[in-house]
């Protein structure tokens, strides 16, 4: 009753006078009804009802009864206590009171179809009870008497109790369990096939969550025309869906290899009704989860090669190789000149991703046969783990033997800054090889880029390697005479998940069309190959394989990211050829396949993560405190330098930089000796030249802090960054991974600090827990800052705020 009264009071308090009058009269009516209920009736004493049930019942009926006062009200007295406008403006509230009403047993109209369904259900239940009694009598275990597909899962479950890891996953699920089934499915789709499969798996076990069924009963009884209303109020609909889902799943399981049926009780295979009653437990064994998760996935994804991030391999130059030394041959052996250049770049040993990818790519040849083209490659490895060299070294090594200049490698990246960065790496590697690398990003005029790309007279490429953004690439494919991808040997899509998420100009499909057009060029048009190319071309063994129509594009597609999508749908945009997957992350735990951890991304082992829960109104002050007095600092009192701060937008960055600089000025008064922190914003509004200048200042320690939106959260390699601060929490886990990945690169130590507003804390922790995987012993540590610690900063902060609004 208290709940109702409080709720009424609240609603009344916010209503207009006439609404108040209506509400109080309805409250009186409700009171009278409650009294009437307490008094004995002809039918016997009234049953006590809980306050929630009473409230819910009334509230549900409110939606239909408020417009016209209830005529046969006895069971709906409290209805008018919720104003219809409130229900109309709060669909979730309306839905929940409706649902509660259904539970409380509000009378509902039953159609014939529904009645038929219920009757059928009743008789099934009876049959099940009988069967259950039989089972008990026979002393069967929970697996016996269940359809083979399901029973096999359950028996495994019993045999293999949950591991620590799987229970942790369970708690992850708990954290995100507030999402509706529809939300979960959408989220799962975003996370890739595993998550979708997991949803599928949970539908097998808890099919109540399945979306609408097309049974008569559900369609006839539904209040709403929307399919998504299966969340519904209707228990019967839920049961119908349950039954159907289980039927479907057992049909599906029939297609799978089945364990032998229980021979001792061959005739006791139950009806589907029994399945509904004997729902399996909510936990599938790890093995069963894995097999569900991998169904329908590409071979390479299921058989992904998992590489330990701690793997290292020594650098060997080709001259050192002894033919008898299998390790040297299997290892990475570059020629002396390239080894020297790599050493000049600070490489003394190969990192894990390089140790896996470089030999894999070097095992193919520069010129591959269109009749047996190489498999494509998808690589997922943590931020700062050296993916750029992993693809650049093989490209340079294989292409430097070329005779004619043709465009043989195309590297696509999402931003200009990244294009420039990769170009610098390739230019260093190409020194002395004669290979030419160039870029097109729109930083220069289109005509200038055309001149750089193509020889006007011969209309041949002037570049061996082109590094570009997708938009500019499509422009050149469309408008630059002679520009072709027909000689391409390597196509690299770096930050692949980000690029595949961008659909502008339909770039992925158009790129694919341009590449696949080369099949014709190589076969029917018989494009003249270089002598070298002809010599290297592997001759197919049978004549049938020489059929020009069998020729395939020779381009090998290489996809890289720290957060690579495992969604086959997304990957298929590029028409990958039987891709090999290399996944650099900690060893696969028992029961965890490559896909079961899809959507969980590995963080660098050298990263320390911290979070501060802060009140929204004082967030800037907490940031200032953090910057001036960084906890866990090796140089206390020196402030937080070599720091990147991420905000949610360019505007936020600008405002924050102004406030910080005003504060630092105000705080500097009288402290001449102390070196003030130097802060600047880095945004897409700045010219490329200004951005280059800022990065150079940061690299040379002339700037301490750069404040940016997510513009530079991906890929940018600033080796000196020691701290990353998320002033606004990232909107998804991939953004978090890329932001924090600007530090702790190439094996260096780095710290990330997330300022989380109190109301965001639960969501943030859940998101991170579900989305990232850390090395053993690592965790997200909470740092506490008491408001008292901010006292000394309040004066200059107030001063800065006043100047900011002036
Ligand atoms: N074997 C190595 N030894 C030492 N330093 C290396 C090695 N390989 C790469 N590096 C350096 O590590 C840094 C990070 O490399 P890179 O930018 O390729 O990382 P990444 O994996 O592409 O990261 P992100 O996912 O953030 O783009 C670079 O400064 C690079 O020069």
Image (cartoon, helix red, strand yellow):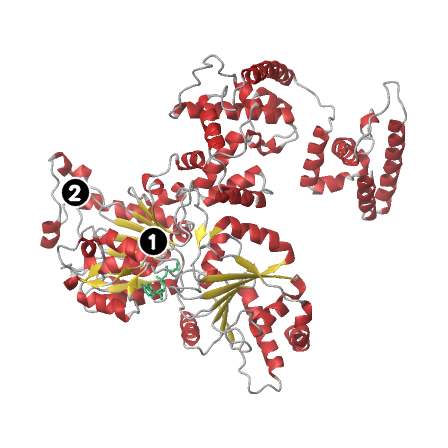
> 631 or 226, which is in the foreground?
631
Task: Identify the mark at residue 523; answer none if there is no mark.
Answer: 2
Residue 344, quarter of the rendered image: bottom left
| Quadrant showing the N terminus | top right
Q: Is residue 117 left or right of residue 246?
A: right
Distance in Å between CA atoms under marks 1 and 2:
26 Å
> Does 454 appear above or below 215?
below
Residue 201 percent coordinates (x, y): 48, 33
> 685 or 245, which is in the foreground?
245
> 732 or 524, which is in the foreground?
732
Residue 92 percent coordinates (x, y): 67, 40
Badge 1: how crowded within 10 Å, few (<14), some, or many (20+)?
A: many
Q: Secondary structure at mark 1?
A: strand
Name the quarter showing ligand 1.
bottom left
Contact check, label 1 and label 2, Cβ < 8 Å = no
Q: Secondary structure at mark 2?
A: loop
> Does 315 appear above or below 153?
below
Residue 101 seen in render: yes
Q: Earlier in the sequence, mark 1 or mark 2?
A: 1
Q: How many marks?
A: 2
Query: Which residue is drawn at the image coordinates 42% and 19% (left, top)?
Result: 261
Residue 459 seen in render: no
> 425 or 608, which is in the foreground?
608
Residue 487 percent coordinates (x, y): 21, 52
Which label sits in the foreground, 1 or 2? 1
Task: Identify the mark at residue 638; answer none if there is no mark.
Answer: none
| Quadrant showing the C terminus | bottom right
Query: Which residue is drawn at the image coordinates 44% and 25% (left, top)?
Result: 149
Query: Which residue is drawn at the image coordinates 44% and 56% (left, top)?
Result: 603
Q: Which residue is mark 1?
A: 493
């Amino acid at each position: 009753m208290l709940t109702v009264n409080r709720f009424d009071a609240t609603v009344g308090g916010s209503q207009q006078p006439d609404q108040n009058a209506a509400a109080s009269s309805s409250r009186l009516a409700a009171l009278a009804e409650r009294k009437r209920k307490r008094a004995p009736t002809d039918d016997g004493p009234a049953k006590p009802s809980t306050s929630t049930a009473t409230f819910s019942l009334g509230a549900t009926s409110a939606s239909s009864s408020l417009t016209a006062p209830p005529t046969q009200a006895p069971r709906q007295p409290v209805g008018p206590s919720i104003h219809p406008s409130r229900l109309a403006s709060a669909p979730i509230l309306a839905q929940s009171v409706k649902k509660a009403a259904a539970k409380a047993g509000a009378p509902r109209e039953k159609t014939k179809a529904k009645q038929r369904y219920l009757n059928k259900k009743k008789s099934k239940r009876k049959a099940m009870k009988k069967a259950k009694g039989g089972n008990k009598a026979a002393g069967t275990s929970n697996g016996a008497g269940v359809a083979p597909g399901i029973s096999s899962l359950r028996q495994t479950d019993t045999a293999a109790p949950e591991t620590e890891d799987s229970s942790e996953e369970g708690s992850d699920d708990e954290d995100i369990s507030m999402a509706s089934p529809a939300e979960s499915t959408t989220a799962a789709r975003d996370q890739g096939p595993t998550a979708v499969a997991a949803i599928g798996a949970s539908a097998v076990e808890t099919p109540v969550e399945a979306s609408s069924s097309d049974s008569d009963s559900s369609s006839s009884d539904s209040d709403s025309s929307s399919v998504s209303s299966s969340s519904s109020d209707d228990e019967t609909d839920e049961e119908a869906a349950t039954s159907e889902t289980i039927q479907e799943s057992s049909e599906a399981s029939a297609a799978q290899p089945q364990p032998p049926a229980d021979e001792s009780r061959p005739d006791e295979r139950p009806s589907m009704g029994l399945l509904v009653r004997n729902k399996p437990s909510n936990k599938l064994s790890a093995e069963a989860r894995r097999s569900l998760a991998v169904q329908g996935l590409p071979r390479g994804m299921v058989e992904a090669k998992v590489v330990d991030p701690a793997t290292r391999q020594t650098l060997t130059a080709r001259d050192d190789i002894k033919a008898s030394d299998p390790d040297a041959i299997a290892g990475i052996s570059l020629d002396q000149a390239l080894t020297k250049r790599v050493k000049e770049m600070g490489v003394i040993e190969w990192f894990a991703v390089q140790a896996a990818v470089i030999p894999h790519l070097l095992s193919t040849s520069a010129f591959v046969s269109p009749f047996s083209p190489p498999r494509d490659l998808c690589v997922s490895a943590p931020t700062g783990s050296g993916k750029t060299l992993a693809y650049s070294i093989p490209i340079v090594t294989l292409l430097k033997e070329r005779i004619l200049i043709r465009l043989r490698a195309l590297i696509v990246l999402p931003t200009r800054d990244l294009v420039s960065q990769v170009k610098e790496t390739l230019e260093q590697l190409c020194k002395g090889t004669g290979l030419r690398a160039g870029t097109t990003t729109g930083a220069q005029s289109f005509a200038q880029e055309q001149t750089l790309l193509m020889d006007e007279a011969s209309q041949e490429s002037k570049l061996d390697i082109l590094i570009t953004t997708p938009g500019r690439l499509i422009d050149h494919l469309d408008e630059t005479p002679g520009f072709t991808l027909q000689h391409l040997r390597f196509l690299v899509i770096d930050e692949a998940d980000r690029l595949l998420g961008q659909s502008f100009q339909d770039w992925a499909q158009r790129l694919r069309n341009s590449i696949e057009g080369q099949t014709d060029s190589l076969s029917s048009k018989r494009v003249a190959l270089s002598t070298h190319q002809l010599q290297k071309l592997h001759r197919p063994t049978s004549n049938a394989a020489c059929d020009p129509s069998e020729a395939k594009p020779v381009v090998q597609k290489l996809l890289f990211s720290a957060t690579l999508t495992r969604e086959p749908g997304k990957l298929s945009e590029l028409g990958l050829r039987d891709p090999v997957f290399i996944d650099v992350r900690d060893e696969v735990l028992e029961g965890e396949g490559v896909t079961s951890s899809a959507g969980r991304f590995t963080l660098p082992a050298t990263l320390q993560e911290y979070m501060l829960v802060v009140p929204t109104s004082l967030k800037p002050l907490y940031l200032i405190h953090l910057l001036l007095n960084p906890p866990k600092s090796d140089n206390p009192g020196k402030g937080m330098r070599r720091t990147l701060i991420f905000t949610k937008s360019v505007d936020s960055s600008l405002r924050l930089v102004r406030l910080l600089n005003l504060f630092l000025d105000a705080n500097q008064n009288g402290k001449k000796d102390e070196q003030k922190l130097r802060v600047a914003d880095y945004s897409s509004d700045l010219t490329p030249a200004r951005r280059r200048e800022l990065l150079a200042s940061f690299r040379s320690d002339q700037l301490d802090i750069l404040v940016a939106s997510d513009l530079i959260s991906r890929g940018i390699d600033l080796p000196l960054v020691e701290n990353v601060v998320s002033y606004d929490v990232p909107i998804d886990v991939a953004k978090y991974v890329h932001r924090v990945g600007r530090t702790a690169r190439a094996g260096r130590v780095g710290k990330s600090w997330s300022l989380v507003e109190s109301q965001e804390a639960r969501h943030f922790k859940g998101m991170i827990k579900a989305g990232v995987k850390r090395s053993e012993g690592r965790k997200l540590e909470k740092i506490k800052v008491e408001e008292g610690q901010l006292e000394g900063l309040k004066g200059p902060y107030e001063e800065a705020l006043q100047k900011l609004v002036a």
